[in-house]
Image: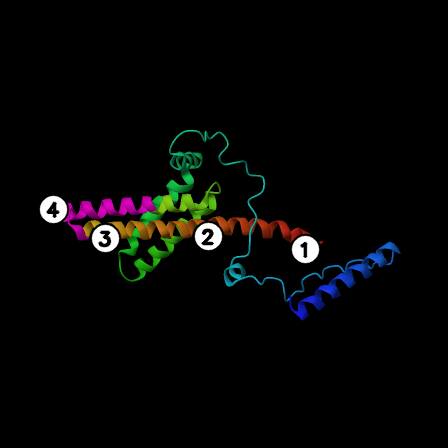
Amino acid sequence: MSRSDDERSRASRAEARRRARLAARGELPEAEPELAPTATEERQPNLLRRIFPAAPPLPGRPDPLAGFDPSGSLRPVRERLFLLRQNVPAWLLPGIAAFVGYFLTLSAGVFGLLGTFVLFGSLIAAGWFGWQRPTLYGTTAALISFVLTTAVVLYTFASEGAGPETFESTSVILSLGLQAIYQAGLGFIGGWYGGYLRRRQTQLSAEMPRRRR
């Protein structure tokens, strides 16, 4: 053991003996309370939290999975099908409206711009009314619009004489697959935003009377 280590050991034992004597006389000072973190030390919200502050769930809503049997195989698939059956209009009607908007986006000019607003507005509406799981309803509505639009386009090409070999080409299949993924992602975002917007609006409406008092 070095000289410095020995000195630190003696100092530590001396401090322990001193605190023992103070404790015996009841003069041992209480431990200093931990200082609360200052405002500058608190974690600042990131940019996403500033744009979309946290919103609570909708009040007074029942459990969307009430009556669902979790036992059995393929639970994720059965759970989503169960939720979709709970509120069919929330994804079917926006899906048809999104189909109209998606079909208009294939046009140029004003109709293409209008179709973009109709498409994304329909997906937001699916998340707004599909409170059970907004992202699921938005994604389903987007996929419905994609399937209907693809069916119309393929039927149009077939009526003009395109054969099966045209639709079986790798480029066509890859293009349709990428478009389906894009539409599903767009539906997920639109549904999430619609659900968030409804929860946030409900929260602000509930807080407004309290602010007026």
> Depth check: 186 or 39 in front?
39
Q: Where is residue 100? Give x, y as percent.
A: 32, 49
Question: If you read the primary sequence from the N terminus, does the residue marked by circle 2 or circle 4 appear first?
Answer: 4
**Residue occupied by mark 2:** 193
Q: Hey, what amino acid is under mark 2? A: Tyr
**Where 76 falls versus 15 (above or below)?**
above
Question: If you read the primary sequence from the N terminus, does the residue marked by circle 3 or circle 4 appear first?
Answer: 4
SS of the residue under disc 2: helix
**Residue occupied by mark 3:** 175
How far apart are the alpha carbons under marks 4 and 1? Answer: 66 Å
- Residue 13 visible at all: yes
Could you tell me which residue is drawn at 48 percent across and 48 percent down?
A: 195
Could you tell me which residue is drawn at 54 percent across and 49 percent down?
A: 199
Q: Is residue 1 left or right of residue 67?
A: right
Q: Which mark is residue 165?
A: 4
Question: If you read the primary sequence from the N terminus, does the residue marked by circle 3 or circle 2 appear first?
Answer: 3
SS of the residue under disc 4: helix
How far apart are the alpha carbons under marks 3 and 1? Answer: 53 Å
Q: Which mark is residue 177?
A: none
Q: Hey, what amino acid is under mark 1? A: Arg
Mark 4–mark 1 CB contact (< 8 Å):
no
Range of magenta residues: 143-171
**Residue occupied by mark 1:** 211
SS of the residue under disc 3: helix
Q: Where is residue 87? Give x, y as percent.
A: 44, 37
